[in-house]
Image (cartoon, rainbow, N blue to C red):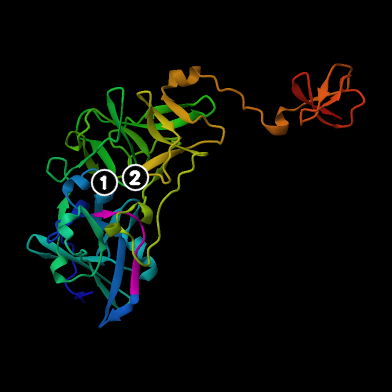
Amino acid sequence: MAAVSMTGMAQVISDGFYRVQNTRTQRWCVLADDYAYVDESASGAGTGSVYLQAIRTYKPFEHVVSDPGSIIKFTYSQKGKGYTLAAQGTDTYTMLKKHGEYYLTLRQNGKAYTASAYAKGFNIHLSDERLENDEKYDTLGYMQPTGELYQYWYITKVDASTDNYFGFKPTLSAAGKNYLPFYAGFSFKKHSDGIRAFYIDSIKPRAGVARYREITDETLPAGVPMIIETSSSEPANNKVDVVDGDGTAPAGNLLQGVYFCSVKEILPYYDDPGAHHEDVYTSYDPSTMRLLGVDNDRLVLRKSSTRYVPANSFYLPVPADCADVVRIVDAAEFAATVEPDPQPTGIESVKTETKSNDTFVYNLKGQRVSANGLQNLPSGIYIYQGRKVVVK
């Protein structure tokens, strides 16, 4: 890593939400997990190595237009120490805290910027990674110290009225509407028409129904898992205004959000996490989780064959006796749905009776043990008149 001067530190861009693009590779930054590592043993002449494998770089823009991890909030420290960059429920200071108090210093060079940080006697400098024939890949590795040519970045404010916008890209379609599960670290307001947001606040698991509520506030809050409905399948028609402030989280939301799904086995070979990296994901458990899906052209929460909960998505926690498919219904249909009693299992299905005269009695292997009812039988469990009984 190149050493940098710590003099002249100042705020060079205003606080706000930005996307960051390398000037040479043309790839955009995305925060894909929350792990970072500084290798102090690799230091030389006051410089150290930083493994920001949490930051991946992608192209083209279509890859990041709907990715919440590409929306990065820049905040300048009031103590004049530099910037923290926040996304996906974390920030650069928190990620690197165990290695020192790293604040990012920006320096402008024409329309581009360089980014560096200093702590505990080490300077770290941010550069994009370069691989052979890299132009053929839409996605490529992680931030690495690769030289001066790759250290310059465009930092462009996110604005729905420009080409640098955030727009929803639906993943599901039902009854003529488009949907996606959504979980992001920023608040937003609807810019395009036809966008609605919902959450789940109650479930009757054995009946297989869950009640939805609409979030009607003008500002939709950060850090809240929600179901997004759109009238269009194109991100350019599903724009939002990314805004500061948390908004008001709805009470009683049962959905559980997941920011990251960074798993070695599902990444392309050129995007595989390297040393000092830990997988950051949520395993999917079909016995206790339901994911957003479609069944008979209807939006539902259902069992899935996936191994991991997707990034920037959610799951609905359910009990083990929950129906495989949970229909998403309004308050009226939810109230009218009767939740069946739990199915008896094992000893719970046994009825206790006293001895009496009757016909055939069988043991649990199906062997007849009496032709005269339950009298004179030793204590135990028997089949009598087509059901299990306990003789005391």
- Can you give x and y, in whole percent of width and height, for residue 233 in the image? 22, 32
Q: Is residue 64 above or below residue 235?
A: below
- Indicate the quadrant where residue 107 lies: bottom left
Please report contact status of discs 1 and 2: CB closer than 8 Å, yes or no: yes
Amino acid on which the number 2 mark rests in the picture: Asn
Provide the residue designation for mark 2.
312
Q: Is residue 46 above or below residue 333?
A: below
Q: Is residue 35 magenta?
A: yes
Region rendered in magenta: 29-39
Give the residue drawn at x 32%, y 59%: 272
Q: Secondary structure at mark 2?
A: loop
Give the residue drawn at x 13%, y 68%: 149
- Indicate the quadrant where residue 297 lies: top left
380 left or right, relative to 51: right
**Residue in the foreground of this view, choosing between 266 and 259:** 266
Q: Is residue 173 magenta?
A: no
Point out the tag, 1 or 2, that comes first from the N-terminus: 1
- Can you give x and y, in whole percent of width and height, for residue 310 in the image? 37, 44
Q: Is residue 348 above or below residue 115?
A: above
**Residue in the foreground of this view, choosing between 8 and 310:** 310
| Number of other residues with Cα within 10 Å of mark 1, as a class: few under 14, some 14 to 19, many 20 or more | some
In the displayed image of the protein, which residue is found farthest to the front?
Answer: 367
- Can you give x and y, in whole percent of width and height, for residue 323 in the image? 51, 29
Give the Cα separation between the discs numbered 1 and 2. Answer: 8 Å
Amino acid on which the number 1 mark rests in the picture: Asp
Provide the residue designation for mark 1.
67
